[in-house]
Image (cartoon, grey):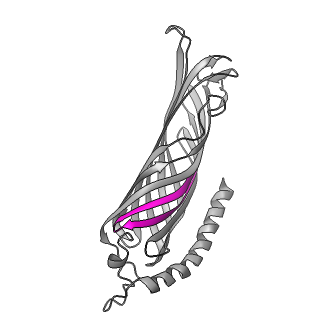
Amino acid sequence: MKKLFYLLIVFLSFFSSKAQSVAEASFNNTLISVENKPNYDVDIQEDLPWHARRFKFTAGVFFPSNNTEVKYGSNNGEIGDVIDFEKDLGFDKSSTSFTGAFEWRISRRSRLGAEYFYLKRTSTKTLERNIEFGDNTYPVNARISAFADNQIIRITYGYAFISKPAYEIGALIGSHVLLGDMGIKFEAGTAEAEFRENFNFTAPLPDIGLWGEFVLGKKVGLYANANYFALKVDNIDGRILSYNLSVLYNVYKNFSLTAGYTGLNVRVDVERERLNGYLKWSYNGPTLAATYSFGNHVKLYKH
């Protein structure tokens, strides 16, 4: 996990040096210099209506491939089984989800962002082995139904320590708030024989990272970020790695389309008075989204 994070940092640093020469060359050919404004490098408002606007809203679909492991047991010595949701409970690895984001550029260097991700999955399966989950044991050949309902709310603050008209590179600090609810129900055919167990939690997982935004042409931009952190707070111990790479194409004025690749790896250990457990969840896959930028332009300076 850490190796992937370091590789993404190296990639971001390497790409920024290459993108600088490409983007500045593109600006020289496509953007109009503004007289009597020696510090304001380009007339972004006229030539790039999608770039460096005060506000940006994005909504789209995400097609993640999931790998999920859960262990949920009692503190009385019954530690529970490690359950692979895809292999043991019959969940599909591939799924479709909604994602949304909003960004407010407070100033030339500072920005606030909010993101939301929602994924609900269900399955039914005849068990191929005994499974201990919570206070119950689900026997082999039992017919069960299961669900995993996960939401992620992310709040970030970004600061651009390099802020140029053609490219920006900065640091991020923020938090992924993971709301998890998952469970198993034994379907015995009669209400008296049925039983169920669910495991739910809310885990705030802070993270820090790097981001880069590059203008590759009059209608094309690129964005990349990578984030990592590990922290224990009270009865929750969490580790998180997330990354994103997306390309933007400006369709018309303030409206653009983006295509990218996003991933997240998270582990959350939760201990309560009676029960304890952990969730190990990773997903990655392509995203398709529409972006609308509005508000006044934030002035970006060459020097």
Indicate whether residue 254 is drawn in magenta.
Answer: yes
* Nearer to the camera, 73 or 231: 73
- Compared with 34, 1 (above or below) is above
Image: magenta residue range? 240-266
Q: Residue 259's x, y, as percent?
A: 50, 59
Please say whether residue 48 is one of the residues in the magenta stretch: no
* Residue 71 in the image: above or below residue 187: below
**Percent position (x, y) of residue 14?**
62, 73
Which is nearer the eye, 217 or 108? 217
> Which residue corresponds to the image point at 53% horizontal and 47% vertical from the top-left?
63
Residue 167 seen from this side? yes
As drawn, is 55 to the left or to the right of 127? left
Q: Position of residue 171 (x, y in %)?
A: 50, 66
Q: Magenta segment, principal secondary structure?
A: strand
Residue lying at 45% horizontally and 68% vertically, measured from the top left: 159
Q: Quick one: which residue is furthest to the right in this view?
A: 129
Q: Quadrant of the C terminus?
A: bottom left
Does the rendering let one see residue 152? no
Q: Nearer the viewer, residue 23 or 36?
A: 23
Which residue appears at 43% of the width and 72% of the height? Answer: 219
List x then y, in percent, for residue 195.
53, 15
Residue 273: image quadrant is top right
